[in-house]
Image (cartoon, grey):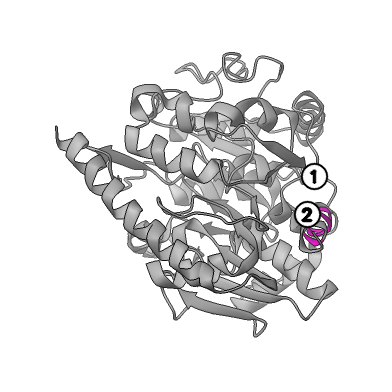
Amino acid sequence: MREANYIRYRKIKAFGNKLCFLLCRIFPINRSRISVCTFEGKGGFGCNPKYIVTELHKRNPEYEFVWFVNDMSKQFPDYVKKVPNTTWSRAYYLTTSKIWIDNYRKPYGTCKRKGQYYINTWHATIGFKSIGLWRGAAFSKMAYLVSKNDSDMIDKVVIDSKWCEEMYPKGMVYGGTYLNVGAPRCDILYGDRTGWKNKFREKRNIPLDAKIVMFAPTFRESADSGKRSVFSEVWSIDFPLLLNNLEKKFGGEWYLCVRVHPQLAAGVEEYKNTQLNGKVIDASQEDDMYEALAAMDAFVSDYSSAIMDASYCHMPVFIYADDIEKYLQDRGSLLWNLTINSEDEVENNKLMTPGINAILPYPIAQNNDELERRIMEFDQERYDSAMKKFERDVQLVFDGKASYKTADQIEKYMEM
């Protein structure tokens, strides 16, 4: 009954939102205007939209970019106009924009008009977490309604692989077409990353030859009667031991870069202690994770899709998953057949991606002892070989040109 009442309330609110959009149709479409949003307004100038917008601005400085944000203190280039992520602001700017770009979902009640085009870049490509209908009972009725309303408006979803093309129809509740060009945010990881490494170290006043590992646990949330809430994080990973093991295995002086969801950023403070000797870098509040990721030498996470992104440049990636059974129960299902045996080969879930036969190439640990062993046993040549096979099996597109190709598609829409 609580969920039914909540859905009824949301439908009434959505009807009001839609009326705002319909009223704003008295204004014509601005054929140069492009409206952008990331993470429902919680994000800033980052993720896939940042790299697409940057490329489009290079091509045509006359394009007008409008970016919806919840926090108006966020910083953007001078060619991007930030606007409040409120009902009337969205109604006016979306209704008068030729192009929409988003990496998440539009609020329930949003409606598109004829002559507009919506590119959704999503915020994860190949990943671990089941999304949408693949979550089964964990996917609420309200979440379905929001997803369906958004997906019905989308003209193209940007993807990076055959794997996504198989998973997304039920994952995103989406029956439309794809732009299989790669993830624009990963362009920065392609080729020589020396410049990004130096920039990151200079900004933080650490030696240019220092090595850095990023720890980026996945964002977690639950639902109670259709309402979302954020999980708190308690990490069991021993960071001083991690840095010590990386130094023994790979040499050099290692630092730890922690990247958690902004809503959990306060949890990073407890790791700024004497044991770590000032070697913790908090990148949680930065809008663009990928400039930081391009500067890394290794990556550790549990179930974040950034695992795949980081590995495309073949930096060492380690999975630290100390709660597989609980996470599987909370999520409803996973896109890969992780088990409590860290020695098992992990295949893709064939129910979700039946046309793919792939094995995860990443060393998996469920406790600190296992993580230490995985680091000490790491072999770059064997890892490179496994990564190349994985990329072939999922039919990955990663050539550093995703932003360019997506901009090509948007320019075609701009002319229609």
On the image, numbered disc 1 is attached to which residue? 181
Callouts 2 and 1 close, C-beta under 8 Å: yes
Q: Which of these two is toward me, 240 or 57?
A: 57
As displayed, is residue 397 above or below residue 377?
Answer: below
Residue at x-position 70% and y-position 20%: 358
On the image, numbered disc 2 is attached to which residue? 406
Q: Would you say 123 lies left or right of 147 here?
A: right
Does residue 86 appear in the picture of this structure?
no
Amino acid type assigned to the residue bearing label 2 in the image: Thr
Magenta stretch holds residue 407 = yes
Q: Residue 122's spot in the image, x, y percent?
A: 59, 47
Q: Residue 89's spot in the image, x, y percent?
A: 45, 73
As displayed, is residue 255 above or below residue 64?
Answer: above
Q: Residue 383's spot in the image, x, y percent?
A: 75, 32
Number of residues whose C-alpha sits closer than 10 Å to that of mark 1, classed few (under 14), some (14–19) or many (20 or more): many
Magenta stretch holds residue 345 = no
In the picture, the quarter occupied by the N terminus is top left
Element type at mark 2: helix
Determine the CA span between mark 2 and mark 1. Answer: 7 Å
Element type at mark 1: loop
Disc on res. 71: none
Residue at x-position 82% and y-position 27%: 392
Span colored in magenta: 403-411
